[in-house]
Image (tube, coloured by chain):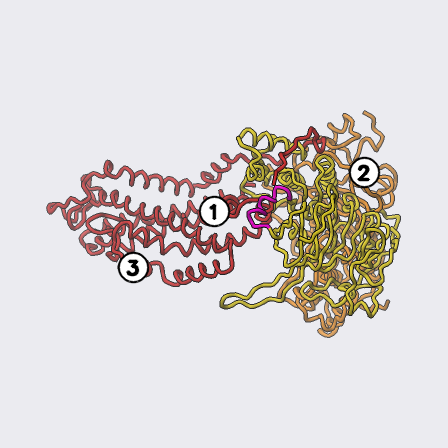
Chain colours: A red, B orange, C yellow
Amino acid sequence: MTILPGSVGTLSASDDIEHAIAPEPGRTALLKDMLFGQASTIFAFSVVVIFLLVAILAPWLAPYDPLAQSVLSINKQPSWAHWLGTDQFGRDVLSRMIHGSRNSLLFGLISPALAAFFGTILGVTAGYFGGVVDRVISRVVDLLLAFPELLLAIMIAAVLGGAFWNIIAVITVAFIPGFARVARASTLAVKQEPYIEAAVAVGLRTPTIIIRHVIPNISAPILVLMTLWVASAIRLEASLSFLGIGTRAPNPSWGNIIRDGLNNLFGSPWPIIAAGFAITCVVLSFNLMGDAVRDVLDPETTR
Amino acid sequence: MTIAPSLSRQQPVSSTHPGPLLKVEDLSIEFGPEGTAVRVVEGVSFSIDAGAAVGIVGESGSGKSMTSLAVMGLIPSPPGRIATGRILFEGVDLLGLPRSRMPEIRGRDIAMIFQEPMSSLNPVMTIGDQIGEAIKLHEKMGREERRQRIIELLKLVGIPDPERRLGAYPHQFSGGMRQRVMIAMAVACNPKLLIADEPTTALDVTIQAQVLELMHKIRRTLNTTILLISHDLGVIADICERVIVMYAGKVVEDADVKTIFRSPKHPYTRGLLQSIPRLKDENTRLYQIPGMVPLPGTIKQGCPFFPRCPDRIDKCARETPPLLEITSQQKAACWVSAGATS
Amino acid sequence: MNIAVTGDDLVVVRDVGKTFSEAGGLVFGRSQPSVRAVDGASFEVKRGETLALVGESGCGKSTLGRLLLRLIDASEGEIAIDGVDILRLSSNDMRQMRARVQMIFQDPYGSLSPRRSVAKIIAEPLEIFGLVQTRKQRRDRVAELMIQVGLSPTFMDRYPRQFSGGQRQRIGIARAIAVDPQFIVADEPVSALDVSVQAQIVNLMQDLQKSRGFSYLFIAHDLSVVRHIADRVAVMYLGRIVEIGPKKRIYDFPSHPYTQALLSAVPEPDPETRKSRIILKGDVPSPANVPTGCSFHTRCPIVQPVCRTERPPLVETASRHLAACHFAKPHPIPL
């Protein structure tokens, strides 16, 4: 089959070319407005940025070795030498918090991202192709959803053990069903849009249609879910560490700082206070960021 | 045709009020926060005599629907706001009435039919109950009497077997039937003014013909005053005696229907009439008005139609023409038609 | 292939039908009644011609348009476009075929992907079929196309939401003509637009056809618009073509009572000619439950007993003018 090259006539179909369209809202200005228009959003972004910097710069920021024990300074109150005091082994709580942020934030960022990736693939496949594919994927997802996340994580961790990547895998698997559900529902809605039919009529291949026209239009709910689950992942890691199957002692994570702190509550309350406060801050910030991301990504609000 | 007595009690053609039934004066409607508000309707004035059928025609963004919603007191507020003007119904300014009085007038004195017959009916209530609700609100009537009234109404709007259909739900009706139910609800309390906002736009052409026929019948039997909002000049020509043409939030022409179709005086009306495809002629290239409707709030000075007008003169760019009397039957907001030269 | 292709027939459709049936689920499915959306459609579209497909909502006109582009697969029948039997093409070959057949959609708001710029939307078909290689070529070609449909190329990096309904429809048209197709299915392209914008788009579509020579299947419910753009008209009712013929014949001498009613129902924008309308009784029956015999018999003003039992075939009442009615007779209606 030969394809006629587009013959370009000199004809301009209508002599009046329209020169007026709705004013451009200014995408960057709009973005700025959405992200920084509200005090809560500025707060959330600042907190996240500060915690990320702390995690990256941990070895340079931490005043002491987080693992160094000292019999001479056990259960110290906060002082100029130890800002957050020390724990029952005489380790500096601030240094443990700073190093622990690396583990917690890594779990918090990597697991939801991986879960979003795999969940989206599953959900879009189920939603776009429908039929048997949909039914099989949906049943498996339903099955996984029937287990509470924590229970699922404990089960897998008990089998695989608590190595770093195992914990990541555990949290990821626990989160996949949620993403798959949202992706599937959004795909079903987007698939009904006339522009999908238009893409087929134009001659696009199915994978291209999915990548170019389906995924960008379901990205908003997925990204919002991701920010929400960053918070959940940090919490889940903390829960696993608290139960003793997460980050292994003596390595610090916010979760096992709390666990150790609980055993020593009457010795010094400061490890629990510090870690609890940090988790609360990060979780709250990511939730607020989720709201902001949703507003920015909704094409209707950028009108 | 036999109409039961309860329906045929006619409105006195001239009520106690001597003037027009509805008089809108200098109505302006704004949207958006104060200061940066955009005017979607500006300085609209017209009046409707009792018993008349008047059409407002215009394209999307002309402000025709907003005008009718303002009469009903249904402007969504916020963000909408009536900035200036008065809406006199039988001599009483509706805008001056306390909010609590409006529901009393809505439904009893002024009723409305909407474009979308599906979403305007409650899906979980039988149509008998929905019509009965309107009657219950405004009239004291026994249960059985009300039932009879509902059956008469359904008969009037041409729903076959009304005794049985009374208990049916909206989803059991087709689009045309639902529009009939909407009309029955609207005329349930024999309103003085019936506002129909694009009543046939969502319907197929053979069903549209049925509904137009029904509107004629309603007028004949109940002597209701009708304000019809439509973009379809065919529908307007069919129902109305007088036409108000709106463009970019303003009234640009107001005349009786024959005059406006025979000798339109505003260049926009002329362009609109020329650009409609007609069943009678073929192959003639359609006339097209160049350019596009200005976005609300972008015209700061002069005639809103100036950028697209074939007859414009310098004065049009500077001064906004008011609605000028061309003949006693016809008003147009155009300097050129009113006799201005350069 | 037993389709006789004469020289000037671009599209040949023979006995095409489509039954939608909802299959039961794996475990908890329930079967739905099947819907006969299109039934035994046969017609041709000539090169450079506009065939209008008219009918009321639910008559199957949009489905038939999509069958011709294989956006929906036909249940039976044959469709040949330029001699190629498209129902037998593999999905890969069908995709290649899409360089020759394009579509213009009804909904100017929904048919453009909201997250892609105008340039990307228009360039998509050009890239698929390798008509542009470099970025500059692509932008030049998009600019040309935008000018041809009456849009300023300065807006090519903007997003669809900033454009009005008419402008979006122009973008959709630019996308459809980008690969220089031979056949365009236009599904109610102007019904969502305002009157004055409608005139602009109809004129644009006619101008493009004149300069490029492609054929249109113009799907519409508005008979006034069709009169301006069509060469021939096919009228559909409940999935079947009930009348087809040259435009002049259909409008001046409609032979099927449904066509007559349809034409007489159009409100004429002229207050001085109140025409007498044929008001049809009742509503269109559900396509899931098509009446026996002639499917129009439940609403027909001239119905006879035979109509309830025997389905009338589509027969010629005059040269190239066919109607499916036992009592078809050319009947000039007072317009």
In the picture of the structure, the residue carrying the numbered disc 1 is A219
Which residue was labeled with disc 2?
Answer: B270
Res B221 → quadrant: bottom right
What is the chain letter for disc 1?
A
Determine if the magenta segment contains residue C45: no
**Disc 1 element:** helix
Residues drawn in magenta: C89-101
Callout 1: 10 Å neighbours few (<14), some, many (20+)? some
Residue named by callout 3: A154
Pick the front one: C166 or A214:
A214
Where residue A49 sits: x, y (%)?
A: 35, 39
Q: Which amino acid does label 3 sit on?
A: Ile
Position of A293 relative to C331 (above/below) = above
Q: Which mark, residue B110?
A: none
Q: Is residue B72 above or below residue B184?
A: above
Residues at marks 3 and 1 on the same chain: yes
What is the CA distance from the residue labelled 1 to the residue labelled 2?
Answer: 48 Å
- Of pointers 3 and 1, the one earlier in the residue sequence: 3
